[in-house]
Image (cartoon, rainbow, N blue to C red):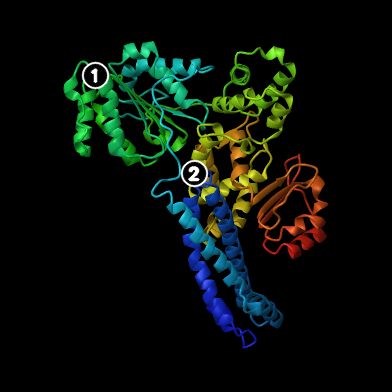
Amino acid sequence: MEFLLSKLDTRVTSAKEVKNDLDRLINTLPRVNILMDKAEWWRFNDQHVAHFLKQLRDAAYDAEDVIAEFKYYELQQQIEGKANRRLLSLLTFIKDLVSNSTSKVKDIQGRLDFVTAELERATDLFGSSNGSTPHETTSFVTESMLGREKEVEVVLQLMQESGDLAGSSNSAKRRKTAGNLLILPIVGIGGVGKTTLAQQIYNNERVKNHFDLRIWVCVSDRFDLKKKTKEMIESANRELRNKESEFDINDNLTNLDSLQHTLKGKVQSRRYLVVLDDVWHENSRDLESLYNPLRSGLRGSMILVTTCLSKVAEIVGTHDPIELGGLPDNIYWDLFKKCAFGSLDPSSFPELEDIGLKIAVKLEGSPLAAKTLGGILRANMTTRQWTNILNSELWQIEQADGDILPALRVSYRYLPLHLKQCFSIFSLFPKYYPLYLNFLSPIWLADGLFSREERIFLEEEKGHWYFQEFKNRSFIVRGEDNNTYLHDLMHDLAKSVSLDICYCQEEDEWSLQNHDTVRHLSVYRKQIELIDNEISKCKKLRSLLFIDGLNYETKLDSSSLRYLFNELPYL
C-alpha cells in the first residue's frame, strides 16, 4: 500500500489519511471476526444479538470489499504504473473514498465501532456462558422406539461376543484395542434417535443381566473432565449403594487423581456398561483421560458413545460405528401418525392424512422432526394450518428448546468460523440438488475463505478438506444415486443462518427483498431476464450462479457478462 500511495500527487490531499484509515480497518477485522464467532452462540436465543450480528456482518463485508478494491488498484498500479489512464482510475477511486471530507473508509469504521460496542454489551450480559443451556439426558426411557430393532440386536450380539473380540486381531469390524474395552460409537445427525437407542439398550433386560454395573453420563457440549468423572462415580454409586456403601463419593473430593482412582475402584473386577451420551469434544487426550480409569474392568466391558461427529467416533472407537440414518418410510409414517394424530384415526381425516404424508416425506426419517411438527399439527387439526406447515420451511416454524431445529443448531454452533461461512453457501442450492466441489470452491474463494497461498496452491485441496469436514459431521449425505447432497434438515438450517447474505431464487417470481446486503445469489436459467431489472440492484454481490434443472452452469453471452461485471464491481 505504501508503494501505491507514494505514486499519488497533490491532487489527492488526503491520501495519507486514507492510508491510516485503511490500516485501522485492516487491524479491526480480526477482532470483529472473533466477536462474530462468539455472537453466533447467542443469535438464536436473543433477538438483540441477532440484530447486531446482522449489522456487524454487513459492515465487515463492506470493509473487506473496500480493502480488496484498494489492493486491486494497488496491484494494477504496480503492474502498469506508467499508464496514465490507470493512474487516473486510481485517483478516481481515492477521491471517491475521501469525497466531501467524509471518507467511505471512515464510514465503515464508524459502523464497525458502533455495532461492535453494542454487540459486546449485549453478549457481556451472558457472562461466561456459551449461549446455550445444555440439554442433559438420562438413562430413563422417555418414549417408545420404532424401527431400531436391528441396531439393538447388533449391540446385544457384540455384548455377548465382546470377550472373544477383545482378544481377537482378525475381526474385520474391530479397528484397535483398548485393553479390555469395547468402545462402540453411535453416530448420526441431531434428532435421529441416538440417545433413544442408547436408552433402550441401557434398559434392556438382557443388558441388565449381563453386566455387573451400568453407568450413564451425558457429556454434552461442555466437556469437564473432573465433573464427568465425578458423575460416573455418582452413577455407579446409585447401583452399588445398597451393597458397598463404602464406595460412596465424598462430595468434597475435587482432586482429579483421587476421582480417577475412585472410579477405577468402582469398575475393577466388574463387567460394566458405560454410556457416554452426546459427546462433542474432539480432543483425543481428554477423551482418553475420561475412559482411562475404566480399563481395569473385566473383559466384556463395553462403552457406548453417542455423537454427531465422525471424528469423535474415529478417536474413541475400537469398533466400527453404528451409523444411524433416518427411519424407513413405512415405520416413519407410523411414528408421524402417532405424533400428529395422537389417539385419533388418521383415516377419519383423509385430507389431513394426505397432507401429513407429504410433510413426513420432507423430514428425512428424523424422529425428533416428527415429534416437533407432529405436536404443532396436533394442536390445530385444520386443513389451512396443515397446508401452511407443508408449504413452510422448517426454519420458518416457531420451535421450542429441544425441538428439531434447536437440536441441529448445536452442530452449527460447533463449526469453526470459516466452516460456518462455508455452510451458509449451501443455501444457494435448492433442496435435493447434488453438491459438486467444483461449484462450491470458487464461491468459497470469492468469500475470502482461502488465503492468498491457498488460492494459488491449495484451492482444490482445501475445498476438498472443507467438504470432507461437512461429511464427517453428518451435514452431507450420499444419495441412492451415489451423488452427495446436503441433508434436507441441514438445508433448512443453512437457509436460517444465511438469510441476509445468500439467496436462491427458485420460484417464478422474484422475491428477494434485501438487495443491499445479499452477497451470494443463485438463479435458474429461466430467470436470466432478471439481470437487467433485479440482479443489477444487488451491488454487493461476490458470486452469482446460474443453474438449471439439468445441473450444469448456464452459459451467458458476452454482452450479458460485460453488463454484469460493470454493474456488480465485487463479482
Distance of label 2 from label 1 (alpha carbons): 38 Å
Q: Is residue 251 above or below residue 210?
A: below
Which residue sits at x=65%, y=86%?
A: 11
Q: Is residue 84 above or below residue 277?
A: below
In this figure, which residue is indicated by the disc labeled 2?
413
In this figure, which residue is indicated by the disc labeled 1?
240
Which residue sits at x=69%, y=80%?
A: 88
Q: Is residue 244 above or below residue 37?
A: above
Residue 80 visible, this orientation: no
Which residue appears farthest toward the bottom when viewing the image? 10
Quadrant holding the C terminus:
bottom right
Which residue sits at x=66%, y=38%?
A: 434
> Between residues 275 and 410, which one lies in front from this camera angle?
410
Quadrant of the rendered structure where residue 263 is? top left
Q: Position of residue 83 (x, y in %)?
A: 69, 81
State left or right for residue 313 relative to residue 471.
Answer: left
Disc 2 residue type (three-letter): Arg
Q: Position of residue 477 (x, y in %)?
A: 58, 34
Label 1 packing within 10 angstroms: few (<14), some (14-19), many (20+): some
Considering the numbered disc 1 on the image, is that residue within a helix, a strand or a loop?
Answer: helix
Disc 1 residue type (three-letter): Leu
State left or right for residue 427 relative to residue 228.
Answer: right
Quadrant holding the N terminus:
bottom right
Q: Which mark is residue 82?
A: none
> Between residues 564 and 195, which one lies in front from this camera angle?
195
Say whether disc 2 or disc 1 marks the residue closer to the N-terminus: 1
Q: Position of residue 303 (x, y in %)?
A: 35, 25
Considering the numbered disc 2 on the image, is that residue within a helix, a strand or a loop?
Answer: helix
